[in-house]
Image (spheres, rainbow, N blue to C red):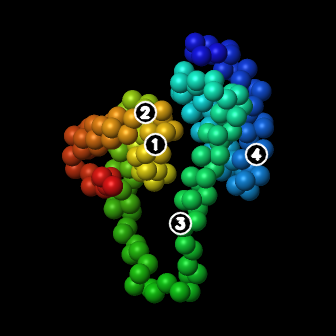
Amino acid sequence: MKGGDPAAFEELYGTYVRRIYNFTLGKLGSVAEAEDVTQEVFEAVFTCLERFEGKSDLVVWIYGITRNLINNRLRRRSQLRFVPLDDVAPEATPADEGPERLACARESLRRVEKVIGALPRDQRRILELRHGQRMSIRKIAQVMHRSEDAVKSSLYRTRRSLAQKLPDSKLELSQR
């Protein structure tokens, strides 16, 4: 299965997808999130299968990836704070910017998504883990089975590439 055989991966997916989905659904309680995490799990399994060392059963390794992704979701969820609308001052709500400004914002977003979509797969994944999931460099290195220096280097190259390809955009990808 380590040879990148699509049929073998398909068999692995068919064997474990329902178990991983049910486990994830039980932990997160949301069908949409469970589907997302299940997809992320098998993406990680597919991209990292070559690095599986066999020190544990394959299913244990897959559940380890699943638990890490679930914990990341729960951590992000706990950082969200909802405020009742009655408690928000009228001046704190965004002003209606009009259709032209909204159209410009949507076009900018499309450009950013296109440029990010063209990045190499590993760079996109590291960018998502760092800025989408707010994962630490150390944790990304563990998930991606790379050194921390390799992750930092990839983030630097990715940010530099984005800045070059989107010179007019005000990207705020912190170096934290």
Using the image, tell me which numbered label, if any, was put on residue 57. none
Can residue 113 be seen? no
Amino acid beneath label 2: Arg
Residue 83, above or below 103: below
Q: Are marks 2 and 1 in contact (CB under 8 Å)?
A: yes
Q: Secondary structure at mark 4?
A: helix
Q: Secondary structure at mark 3?
A: helix
Q: Which residue is mark 2?
A: 146
Seen as rendered, the residue at the extreme front is 55
Residue 27 place in picture, x, y as percent: 72, 53
Q: Earlier in the sequence, mark 3 or mark 1?
A: 3
Using the image, tell me which numbered label, if any, was put on residue 140. 1
Cα distance, mark 2 to mark 1? Answer: 8 Å
Quadrant location, the C terminus: bottom left
Using the image, tell me which numbered label, if any, was put on residue 23. 4
Q: Secondary structure at mark 1?
A: helix
Q: Earlier in the sequence, mark 2 or mark 3?
A: 3
Amino acid beneath label 1: Ile
Q: Earlier in the sequence, mark 2 or mark 1?
A: 1
Q: Which residue is mark 3?
A: 79
Quadrant location, the N terminus: top right
Cα distance, mark 4 to mark 3? Answer: 23 Å
- Tell me what residue is drawn at x 43 percent, y 50 percent: 136
Cα distance, mark 2 to mark 4? Answer: 27 Å
Residue 97 place in picture, x, y as percent: 36, 69
- Tell me what residue is drawn at x 54 percent, y 59 percent: 76
Tell me if mark 4 has few (under 14), some (14-19) or many (20+) residues whose alpha carbon lies within 10 angstroms of its own.
Answer: some
Depth check, front residue: 142 or 129: 142
Depth check, front residue: 172 or 24: 24
Amino acid beneath label 3: Gln
- Tell me what residue is drawn at x 56 percent, y 86 percent: 86
